[in-house]
């Protein structure tokens, strides 16, 4: 039944040979790889305003200089990532770049924070997408968490079915979103130019604001940087581009940077001009759209495409996380199961882990985007900084043609991202301290897993020193509960394996013990019976004691002890609770605690 | 760790020889076996008033004639149970009496409703005990459910430790409760006699009441009958009495009846005279006590002993349920696990089932006693009626000396209890209909379990027709994942068992397949290797297919197929998630679906 549910949800299994991918042209790549970055526009401006509003609406004009700061940072990032694209044409994830240039531990820091970050990408994007939906339909607002969880489950199932990043259908929502936002910005600017928006809605640039501190401004800037999450996506996906890959990827990156800059500037400017304040139950973009068009079909179109692109942004997490987990697992830093392809050729375990992780985050943070975003941004800026630093070392080491200008670009990138990171820790410590606990724990976990795999391969290697123990013969122990057809069957089987077969019976009282022995001699005169008395009504205990002794003796003459246990196979599942399954208990105990070979002889009931 | 927690909670295991019980004298038996019946006084009166209050406080005087009705019923029950005691000196539970006289199905109806009923005994008694506690300490009222659940867990643990009914310490709370209630009734009557209680508090007997229907009166009567639950306890426990058992038991039964009559009458009369109305957050007994003494130490003493006796009443469920489950399991109507004595010699599985069942009921009904009591009472009156009817048939069949008067007593008993049962179904159908669903389901379950056990013993019997298949030899299949020390170990072992050893390797791509075959020939030239190609990255599927073929061929020459699977035993538990445990999957699949003998060779990692 479980199997057919699985088939219904994720479809028939695919053959390994069916793997393959078609390459992306620039326009499609732009759409598909930019959803994460472009969708940040949906919450970036809002994050800035949420900080400024704490000193009052007069401070809103500061969002403009802060936006300029974010744009400068964006420029630096684009330039540095352009270099990574050319240096790592096979895909330069922060894990690879940091590991190769800075060393394994830095790679693990980058990898660990990215893993956490992809989970946050899903949680944040889905929560923000849900916000876009509930802004449009306020009646749904109380169901935020449930809607978000259902969306995550849906995306997880789609990905288990094998929704790849290259599916053309995923490109349209991004185009629609860009078009929708450009229209909104255009119409908004037209309204402003034609004087339809009263200037009284906003405080003029330069108005002095009481209580505004540098600390607060930095905090607002750090919040605004959340608009830059997702910029790294293109540099990870170079193998998906058409040839010449690096050139196409670099051009796409620049197009994306331009689009992001235009949309972010436009939204921030309109929010400022309209004098929009952040509200708990309606997003800033929704307010701008409502202000520009009223709540007509264009408004719903904008909200719809926003929700869609945010869901798509979550989907990029589903491409990136399993791949990173695969890389870490291939390097033996994560459990091997992350290297296995599922029925539909996706790395199912990674997909499922991501889905569960983000649901836990959404529920724990009650779907409140603003509580997740600082953590998310920190998680992004750690690998940003590490990969830029890695590139610096690479240039210093390799010194290729024109390395000084290359180094400068990455140096500026590294410095800026490091600064932003420090601003985060200084201004939002309460929201991001937990990463200082989690990250070291994850790194320790990576190392312990690695140690274990190394230990195992040491022990499995044929060339290892310990020679296998020679086996001279086998003693077979058959625990018998009564004189039944099942026991007869097991004894017959045991006889074919060895001459040394011993039946063991555990008796609970002396009288039945004696009777059993007498009947046994008549029934199986050629097989030695040992009866054990159990004072505590336990079967496992006296049996184990006996087997310990037998094993000790057997070892002296290089004999192996095998315990032969009959196992009832009931016709219907529910019948199992009617049998005590002591065979399962005995088997597990002997295998795990005593290192005894256990043979299970199934006996299938026919009715 | 689990084991040491278990040891701490329930103590060291006891030897079977330590079983034994000492016999009860009348006075102690009275105390210990009456707690269930006497504790009903704590809620019986309240149940009557809860019905009457629906037409108004003027109807309260009707509680007196209703109480008279209940007393008559009590008399009939005592007389009939006296006869059961003499006829079934080994303990005449309703299950035994009905099964022997009316047939198996009636016995199962009685047994089934008693099983449900014991769970309800625990739920109702503990909830009522909690009510007594929270009446005294109103601040605790919101924690009713949690307090009740904690109490159930405590009693369950105590019973797992082996708290037997015969523990002397259990007698004191009953004495104290009887003394406390007698004092309360005495002082109350004295206050009334000396005119301290204004007559205006109650409406005089005979006041006409608007809106009172026969239906409502019957309903109130039915509710009052809940005061009679637990009367059957003595007749089940005759083996625990000192000799001459039946006489002592009969005398104890009559003493209990008298005490119950006095306490119930006293409480009902005081409640009427004081004009007490049932309240959600304070019990009727608590109100009477507060009215009589004020909230001083005597009040708290009364509440305390009431809570204690109710908890003890729950404890009688813990003696009765496991014993009944044992009887049903011994007759093969319930899973065999209910016949096993636990570490402390109690029937642990029954105790745990009862604890879990009553916690579920308490939580589902939010600890509201009044919602559970109707179901509880119906569950009691079904076996009441059945055992009386069984006795009638017994007298008709055996016709001993004076059988006509004996028959008359049981006939009256049967008629009255049947009438009460019908009143229940007519007046409280909404609250008790569920028993009409559950009871048939339980009976069906009993029968299906019985059928299965009969089928199994048929199939296990040595005399059955099918002769065992002769075994001419063994073919051993060893699935190999690589060329490691573990595989070497398994192959060496396999060689000692049979000459026919086949290694099977599942490959995912053609190239590695070929390389593997080449290296194998160099490594193990004497063992035949079969490589299987898996298109769907599944190991189980191609392996199963191969084994099916092998088994088919082997069967022709009476060979058995054994699959030999190496199983890693990791040094630490968490290491297990780092291995894919495909061996577990393969083993389970082959055992349960394919009927193949599976040998597990443990390979213990040393680090």
Image (cartoon, coloured by chain):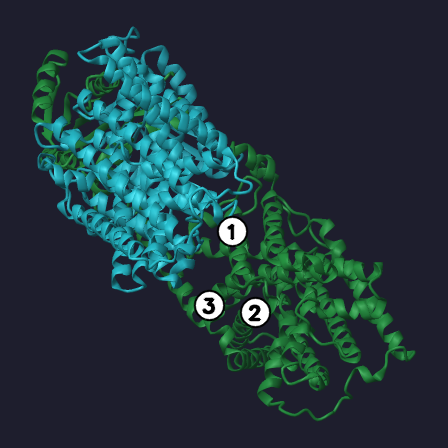
Chain colours: A cyan, B green
Q: Are marks 3 and 1 in contact (CB under 8 Å)?
A: no
Residue under label 2: B371
Of A198 and B277, nearer the camera is: A198
Mark 3 and mark 1 lie on one chain; the one further toward the N terminus is: 3
- B140 to the left or right of A576: right
Of B495 and B198, nearer the camera is: B198
Q: Could one spot residue A569 in this view of the protein?
A: no
Q: Residues within 10 Å of mark 1 (few under 14, many from 20)?
A: many
Res. B109 mark: 3
Is residue B546 shown above or below B199? above
Residue B138 percent location from the top left of the image:
71, 61
Closer to the eye: label 3 or 1? 1
Is residue B432 shown above or below B9? below
Of B263 and A383, nearer the camera is: A383
Res A188 quadrant in image: bottom left
Mark 2 and mark 1 lie on one chain; the one further toward the N terminus is: 1
How far apart marks 2 and 3 lie (CA) works out to 23 Å
């Amino acid at each position: 039944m479980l199997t057919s549910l699985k088939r219904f949800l994720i479809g028939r299994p695919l053959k390994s040979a069916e793997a393959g991918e078609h390459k992306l042209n620039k326009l499609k790549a732009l759409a598909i790889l930019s959803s994460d970055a472009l969708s940040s526009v949906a919450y970036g401006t809002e994050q800035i305003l949420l900080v400024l509003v704490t000193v009052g609406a007069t401070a809103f004009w500061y969002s403009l200089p802060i936006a300029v700061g974010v744009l400068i940072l964006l420029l630096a990032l684009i330039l540095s990532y352009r270099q990574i694209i050319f240096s790592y044409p096979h895909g330069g994830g922060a894990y690879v770049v940091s590991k190769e240039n800075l060393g394994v531990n830095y790679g693990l820091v980058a990898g660990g924070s990215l893993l956490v970050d992809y989970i946050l990408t899903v949680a944040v994007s889905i929560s923000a997408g849900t916000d876009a939906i509930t802004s449009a339909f306020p009646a749904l607002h109380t169901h935020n968490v449930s809607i978000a969880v259902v969306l995550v489950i849906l995306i997880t199932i789609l990905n288990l079915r094998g929704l790849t990043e290259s599916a053309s259908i995923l490109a349209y929502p991004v185009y629609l979103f860009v078009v929708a936002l450009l229209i909104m910005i255009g119409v908004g600017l037209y309204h402003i130019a034609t004087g339809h928006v009263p200037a009284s809605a906003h405080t003029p640039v330069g108005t002095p604001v009481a209580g505004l501190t540098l600390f607060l401004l930095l905090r607002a800037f750090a919040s605004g940087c959340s608009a830059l999450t997702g910029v790294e996506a293109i540099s990870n996906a170079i193998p998906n581009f058409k040839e010449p890959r690096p050139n196409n990827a670099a051009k796409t990156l620049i197009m994306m940077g331009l689009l992001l800059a235009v949309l972010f500037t436009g939204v921030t400017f309109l929010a400022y001009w309209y004098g929009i304040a952040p509200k708990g139950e309606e997003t800033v973009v929704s307010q701008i759209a409502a202000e520009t068009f009223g709540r007509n079909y264009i408004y719903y179109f904008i909200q719809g495409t926003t929700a869609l692109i945010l869901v798509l942004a979550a989907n990029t997490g589903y491409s990136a996380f399993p791949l990173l987990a695969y890389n870490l697992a291939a390097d033996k830093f994560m459990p091997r199961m992350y290297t296995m392809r599922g029925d539909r050729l996706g790395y199912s375990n990674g997909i499922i882990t991501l889905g569960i992780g983000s649901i836990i985050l959404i529920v724990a943070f009650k779907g409140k985007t603003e509580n997740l975003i600082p953590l998310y941004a920190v998680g992004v800026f750690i690998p940003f900084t590490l990969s830029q630093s890695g590139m610096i070392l690479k240039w210093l080491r390799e010194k290729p043609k024109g390395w000084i200008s290359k180094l400068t670009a990455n140096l500026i990138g590294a410095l800026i991202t490091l600064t932003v990171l420090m601003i985060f820790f200084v201004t939002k410590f309460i929201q991001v301290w937990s990463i200082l606990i989690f990250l070291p724990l994850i790194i320790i976990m990576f190392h312990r897993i690695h140690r274990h795999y190394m230990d195992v391969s040491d022990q499995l290697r044929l060339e290892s020193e310990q020679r296998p123990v020679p086996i001279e013969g086998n003693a077979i122990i058959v625990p018998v509960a009564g004189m039944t057809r099942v026991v007869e069957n097991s004894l017959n089987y045991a006889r074919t394996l060895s001459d040394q077969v011993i039946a063991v019976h555990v008796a609970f009282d002396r009288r039945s013990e004696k009777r059993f022995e007498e009947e046994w001699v008549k029934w199986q005169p050629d097989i030695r019976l040992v009866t054990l008395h159990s004072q505590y009504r336990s079967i496992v205990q006296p049996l184990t004691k006996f087997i310990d002794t037998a094993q000790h003796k057997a070892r002296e003459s290089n004999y192996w002890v095998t315990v032969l246990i009959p196992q009832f196979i009931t016709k219907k599942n529910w019948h199992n609770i009617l049998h005590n399954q002591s065979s399962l208990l005995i088997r597990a105990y002997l295998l795990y605690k005593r290192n005894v070979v256990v043979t299970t002889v199934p006996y299938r009931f026919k009715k």
